[in-house]
Amino acid sequence: MSPSLDFDRVTVDEVSRHFGRRRAVSRVSFVAPRGSVIGLLGPNGAGKSTLLAMLATLLRPSGGSIRYGTIQAAGAPPELRGRIGVLGHDLFLYPELTARENLAFFAGLYGRRDADDAARVALTRAGLADRGDDLVSGFSRGMRQRVALERALIHEPRLALLDEPFTGLDESSTRALVTRLQGLRESGAAIVLATHDLDVADGLLDEAIFLREGRMVDSLSRPEGLRAAYRRAMTGPSRS
Amino acid sequence: MIRVAWLILRKDLTVEVRSKEIVYTTLFFAVSCVLVFAFALVREGRGPEDGAAGILWIAVMFAGNLALGRTFERERQSETLRALLLAPASRPAVYVGKLLGILVLLFGAELLLVPLVALLFQARLLSHPFWLTAIMTTGTVGFAAVGTLFAAMLVRARSRDVMLPILLYPMTIPVMIGGVRGTVALLQSPPDTASVTMWIGLLVCMDVVFVTIALWTFEPLMTE
C-alpha cells in the first residue's frame, strides 16, 4: 500500500446526497481524526447509511466534498479503498464458504500476501478459532457478525465504517466488540459507526453526530447521557 | 487485475462446487430445451436442415441468462457485490473475475449440449472440433461479456429477472446471428470454411468491442 495514500483524518465538508428529488443527506460536516470514534445517531431514514456509503466511496456526494487527509474522494485511486474497512448492515459474507475461506478471500482481495495467516488471526480475534472450517451458513447471527467485523478489519484499515455493528450480538459479544473498537481506536484508526444502540455507544464515542431527515441537527464531543441528548436533538429545532 | 480476477473466479467456483445450484438448474433447463425441440422437429431420426445450429445457440443463450441471473443473485443476498466493489482493486478486475466464472459455467454446459444436439439432430457438429470450438468460444464470450455487465448493473433492481433478458437478448442479436450462421456454415457438406472464418472474425471483433465497452463502463456504472 502506498504510504502517500495514508491519512490522519477524514473531513466531511458540507456533504449532500440527493436521489432524484429526495434529499437523503443535506450539508453534513464533521471531522474524524485518527484515534477517534464518531457516532452517527438518528432514526431510520436519517441518512446514516447513505453517509457511510459516501465515506466508503460507494456513492458520490451530490454536493460538498469528502477528503481523506489531503486526498479528495472524487478521483481517488482504488488503492485508497485499501485504507477503508466497511461493516455493512448486510454482512458481506458468502454463506457457502467457511469462515476461514471468507476471511482468506477478503484478505487476498485487499492485497494481503499472508491471507491464510491473516484469516487465522482474525478467527482467533473473533473467538471462532475452533469453528473456522464451518460454513458461515451454519452460524448464528452473532457469530456471523463477529466474522463480518473481522472481515472488515482484516487489512488493518485507517478508517473503519460500521453500520449497526451491535445488531444481533449478545451481551458478552457486545462487550467484546466494544473492547475491539477501543483497541482499534488506540491503534490509530478513525472509526465512524452508525447505531441505534445508545446504551452501548454511551461512553464509547468521542463525538456524536445527530442526524434527522438527512440533516445534522446537533453534535456533541465526549457525549455522556447519550439517550437524553438524543431525545433533545430529535425533538428540538434543526441546527442548520 | 489478474490476481483479483483469479481470486473471484476461484471463489465463484468453490461456491458452485459446494451448492451445484447453477450447474443443475442451467443443465436441466438447457437439456429440456433441446429435448423439446427434438420431440417437435426430428422426424425419422433427422432434424430440419440447419436446425441444430439454431437450437444449440438458443439452449446456450437461455441457459446463459439463467446462469447470469443466479450468479449475481448470490452476490445480492448478502450484498457481497458491494464488498467486492469496496476492495482496493480496479473495478474492471471484479468484472473480469465474474465474467470468467460465467464462462466456465457456460463452457461446461456446452460440453454437454453439443454432443446432445449432435446426437438428437444427427448433425455433424463434432466433425470439425477446432472450428466448432472457435465458434462456440467467440460466441459465448460475446454473450457473457454483455450479460455480465447487465446482470451486475441490475443486481439491485427490483425487476432484475425480467429486465435482464429484455436488455440482454436485443443487445446480443449480432452475437446470436454470428454464432448461428457460423455453425450453419460448419454443418454444410463440405463445410464452408470461408464463411466459418468470416463469422469467427466478426465474433472476435464483437467480443473485443463488448469486452472493451464493459471494462470501460463497469466502474462508473457500479459506483452509483
Image: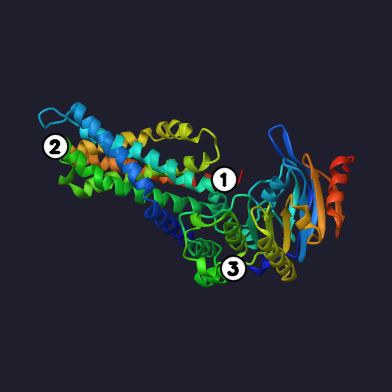
A151 up-or-down from A58: above or below: below
Residue B186 spot, x, y in % from top left: 20, 40
Depth check, front residue: A15 or B204: A15
Q: CA distance from mark 1 to mark 2?
A: 45 Å
Is residue B133 something that shows in the picture? yes
Which amino acid, mark 3? Answer: Gly
Query: Badge 2 local density, few (<14 within 10 Å), some, or many (20+)?
Result: some
Which chain does the numbered disc 3 sit on?
A: A
Query: How many numbered circles are shown?
Result: 3
Q: Secondary structure at mark 3?
A: loop
Please identify the quarter of the rendering in which residue B24 is found: top left
Residue A144 spot, x, y in % from top left: 57, 57
* Residue bearing mark 1: B222
* Residue bearing mark 2: B122
Query: Badge 1 local density, few (<14 within 10 Å), some, or many (20+)?
Result: some
* Badge 1 and badge 2 both on one subunit: yes
Which chain does the numbered disc 2 sit on?
A: B
Q: Between disc 1 and disc 2, whose residue precedes?
A: 2
Is residue B206 something that shows in the picture? no
